[in-house]
Image: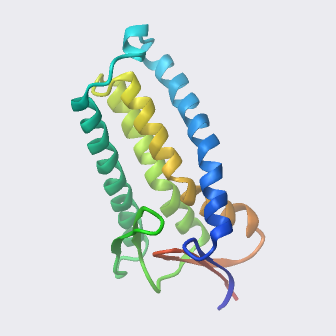
Amino acid sequence: MEILREINITKDKKLAIWLNIISLPTFFLFSYLFYLLGLKIQHPTIENVIYTIHLGKLFLFVLAILAVVIIHELIHAFFFKLFKPKSKVKFGINWKLGAAYATCPKVTYDRWQMIVISLAPFIIWSLTLTILFDMNLLSFPAYVGIASLHATGCIGDFYYVYLLGIKYARKKILAEDTAVGLIIYSKN
């Protein structure tokens, strides 16, 4: 196998800056989309959309975001193991990036497996949060805020999907997830 591309977000400052820059419009886009979806589901009153944030609610919001991040990585881990049951998943926090991760070092996945692994947390969390909101277990602002922040946090996963599904779409490839990025190999 020949390495086609090795992504190391901690060393590639240009990529790290680009991903951070693209995160801002991504946040606004997803805020708008989840806002519209929320309006379709519940038709909230203005009192439900805009309300005072108390310290206790802010604390719960931060705890919810932390739970979402942890479960996001557990979802990646589940799919790593689903596709390669004998693989060993490692968890950690990359303090330079300010990001938690689940990775399966030295294990390669085919294109579609890695795309599923990359997109699974976004899809599962978006559906879960929407269902919780529909069941009145999340307020309108909490739903839009948590769902939008999570979707924005998926920017790296979306970038991997772009590379695997679009940029290298015409090549036979395998991919290896690492603690700092992704390695794309040509499949001979």
Residue occupying the far left of the picture: 56
Total tally of numbered discs in the picture: 0
Q: Nearer the viewer, residue 188 or 155?
A: 155
Q: Is residue 10 above or below residue 142?
A: below
Q: Quadrant of the C terminus?
A: bottom right
> Residue at the spot x=64%, y=41% of the render?
25
> Residue at the spot x=57%, y=28% of the render?
32
Left or right, residue 133 beside residue 17: left
- The picture places residue 71, in percent across and down from the top left corner, at 32, 54
Q: Is residue 47 above or below residue 137?
A: above
Q: Is residue 57 above or below residue 65?
A: above
Q: Nearer the viewer, residue 162 or 186?
A: 162
Q: Nearer the viewer, residue 12 or 36?
A: 12
- The picture places residue 165, in percent across and down from the top left corner, at 68, 62
Left or right, residue 64 beside residue 126: left
Residue occupying the far right of the picture: 170
- The picture places residue 119, in percent across and down from the top left corner, at 52, 55
> Residue at the spot x=29%, y=34% of the render?
58
> Residue at the spot x=56%, y=60% of the render?
156
Q: Quadrant of the N terminus?
A: bottom right
